[in-house]
Amino acid sequence: MEDVFKPRIQSSGQRIERIEDFLEDEKGTGEISPELYQLRKRRMKSMSKYHQTIAKTLPMLEKLF
């Protein structure tokens, strides 16, 4: 758990943050339409919630193993 899952959870959280920042940059420069921005924003929010759930569940799984 410690060697495999924890680093991947941490790095995926960082990647999600970078993607969200990139999305905001695209919106600010007008590279994407407002509709496409909203679609991507919803998808990133969903992905972020999924990631948070996994990050919260990991400590419980560590206790089991």
Image: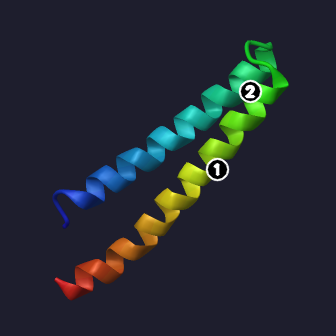
Quadrant occupied by the C terminus: bottom left
Residue 13 versus residue 33 in the image, above or below:
below
Report which quarter residue 36 is drawn in: top right
Q: Earlier in the sequence, mark 2 or mark 1?
A: 2
Furthest-right residue in view? 34
Q: Is residue 25 left or right of residue 34?
A: left
Left or right: where 65 falls relative to 57: left
Question: Helix or strand or loop: what does disc 1 sit on?
Answer: helix
Residue 17 in the image: x percent, y percent?
55, 41
Q: Which mark is residue 36?
A: 2
Label placed on residue 18: none
Separation (CA) of disc 2 from disc 1: 14 Å
Structural crowding at the residue carrying mark 1, measured as other residues with C-alpha within 10 Å and reported as few (<14), some (14–19) or many (≥20): some
Q: Residues within 10 Å of mark 2 (few under 14, many from 20)?
A: few
Percent x, y of residue 62: 24, 79
Instruction: Report the residue marked by disc 1.
Output: 45
Q: Is residue 15 above or below residue 47?
A: above
Residue 28 at what x, y percent from top left? 80, 21
